[in-house]
Amino acid sequence: MSCLLMRESPMIIALNKEKTVYDGFITVLEKDFRIRISLPPDHQMKQAKLHCCWQMKRLLHGYQHIVKQRLQHSTNLMAFILELRTVLEVALKSQPGCQSFSPPQYYSQLITEMEILGWDKLLFIDAEFRTLKMKAEDSAGRQHAITIKLKSKYPAEAPEFSADLPVPLVITWTSQSTLAVVHSQFLINVEALSEFWSVLDEIDEQTWVLEPEKPTKADSMRRIAIGNNVSIKVQIDPRHPKMLPECCLLGAEHVVTPLRNKLNANMHLWNPDCSVLQNMKDVLEIEFPSPTTHEKSSFSVECGICYSYRLESDIPDQVCNDPRCGQPFHQVCLYEWLRGLPTSRQSFNIVFGECPYCSKPITVKMVTGNA
């Protein structure tokens, strides 16, 4: 064991012939710590005692129970020193401001790759040269960004990639891959979605989109205003954007039912060669209000309970079915209101009650998370 100890920890030596007292230094992450270990005559680690410098004591604050446990359960001194070194490494890395630096070739390779790719493609790089954000422009002039998190063994170890896309980002990585290869693969990903974004661009430009308020490139849903308190929620398929999307009509039943009937009756008229917006106009037999014909305030009717339009990210989507009322409410507001009334009743996940405005029958689905 003494030979192994000398090889693994040459700065720790025995101070007596019995080899029951060892003194010296243990090195972790280029830092040296003075230690002394006293063993009983039978060399059993259960009765061993560890003495260390004040720097190591302060570093191991909160880890004492782990060190004590390893001291009692290690098979020999060599095993304990190896485990002590692991604990110290964890403690050092968890300290604020403690950073492990990569070898010089890591940085030189990274800089070389950026020079080949072009520094104009770099949007951001952190102080540790670990996280990069690169930009790319597709054929339609849209700007995109990919975030790359490099590992310590880069390029042998594959980085982590993320981007604002409606489908999983596909990047193939080998030990010979470079940032330029990643950038070109990212462009292939975004070009494959060009038609999808073109469909949404037309909807965003020519209709009043109620939700999402600030759509990202990953958002494939649009809630489009049809009229006062009436809208349609469409889910565009990123892989087949010209096909008939999933549709959900929202509003009072007496308004929604005729639109739903038209949708079902005219579904066969959907033409993939036409734009999605034009197809929706033809199938529903309507003209969508647009920024050129209507003000958005016409569709931003406040909730009749909380008197606000946007509640966090939600807008009023529950409407009284009485044609003389038609007051909109947030789902959560209406649910809480009806739940507090003694006259309301619940069947499965539907709450039945009276409209807070006109007292006519109204229903709302139970809000997720409430019993």
Image: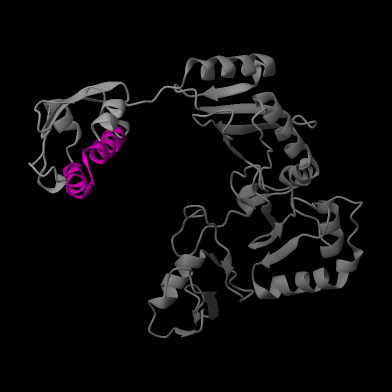
Q: Is residue 189 left or right of residue 279?
A: left
Residue 167 in percent (x, y) is at 68, 48
- Relative to residue 254, is residue 228 depicted above or below? above
Q: Residue at x 68, y 53 (%)?
A: 222
In this rendering, position of residue 187 left or right of residue 282:
left
The residues colored magenta run 63-90
Q: Position of residue 367 (x, y in %)?
A: 48, 69
Location of residue 230 (image quadrant): bottom right
Q: Nearer the viewer, residue 199 or 179?
A: 179
Can residue 1 be seen by looking at this rendering?
yes
Type of secondary structure dominating the magenta stretch = helix
In the image as oriented, which residue stretches furthest toward the front?
17
User: Could you tell me which quadrant the C terminus lies in?
Assistant: bottom left
Q: Residue at x 38, y 84 (%)?
A: 342
The residue shown at (23%, 40%) is 80
> Coloring scheme of the render?
one colour
Q: Let me know if residue 66 is in the magenta part.
A: yes
Question: Along the horizontal axis of the image, is 256 left or right of 146?
Answer: right
Q: Nearer the viewer, residue 143 or 16?
A: 16
Q: Quadrant of the N terminus?
A: top left
Q: For this rendering, which residue is in front, 280 or 87?
A: 87
* Quadrant assignment, res 20: top left
Q: How many marks?
A: 0
64 w.r.t. 34: above or below: below
Report x, y in % for residue 238: 74, 50
**Residue 363 at what x, y percent from top left?**
54, 78
**Can residue 119 be seen?**
no
**Looking at the rendering, which quadrant does residue 186 occupy?**
top right
Query: Toward the viewer: 123 or 310?
Result: 123
